[in-house]
Amino acid sequence: MLRVNEYAAVVARFFSIKDKRGVTAIEYALIASLIAVVIITGLTTLGSKLNSTFNLIAQSISS
C-alpha cells in the first residue's frame, strides 16, 4: 500500500508536475473531506440515539 507522499509522487510524475505544492493542497483537501464525512456520520448516529433517549425520557415524565 502506498503512503500518501509516495502516492503524491506518482501523481506528480503522471501529470509531469514539477511543483508539488498543488498536490499537497489536494492531499490536505482529501484528508479534510474524509474527516468531515466521519464527523457527519458520527453526529448523525449520535443525534438519532439522543433523539430516541429524549423521547423515552419525555414519555416517562408524561406518564
Image (tube, rainbow, N blue to C red):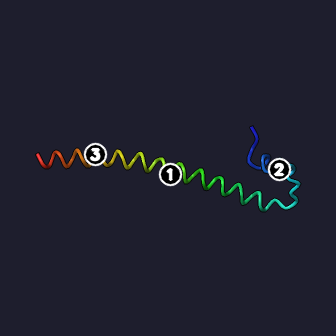
Q: Which residue is mark 1?
A: 39
Alpha carbon of mark 2 to alpha carbon of mark 1: how far?
29 Å
Type of amino acid under label 3 = Thr
Mark nearer the N terminus (3 vs 2): 2
* Residue 36 image offset from top left, x and y in percent: 55, 54
Residue 2 placement, left or right of 50: right
Q: Which residue is mark 3?
A: 53
Query: Which quadrant, please, contains the N terminus?
Result: top right
Alpha carbon of mark 3 to alpha carbon of mark 2: how far?
49 Å
Residue found 71% across the figure and 57% down from its top: 26
Kind of element beneath mark 1: helix
Q: Quadrant of residue 20?
A: bottom right
Image disc number at residue 30: none
Residue found 66% across the figure and 53% down from its top: 30
Report the residue that reaches farthest toward the left: 63
Residue 27 placement, left or right of 45: right
Asked if the residue under mark 1 is in contact with the one under mark 2, i.e. CB atoms within 8 Å, the reply is no
Kind of element beneath mark 3: helix
The number of discs equals: 3
Query: Which quadrant, please, contains the C terminus?
Result: top left
Q: Residues within 10 Å of mark 3 (few under 14, many from 20)?
A: few
Residue found 39% across the figure and 47% down from its top: 46
Mark nearer the N terminus (3 vs 1): 1
Q: Residues within 10 Å of mark 1 (few under 14, many from 20)?
A: few
* Residue 22 image offset from top left, x and y in percent: 77, 61
Q: Which residue is mark 2?
A: 9
State whether residue 21 is above or below residue 10.
below
Type of amino acid under label 2 = Ala
Type of amino acid under label 1 = Ile
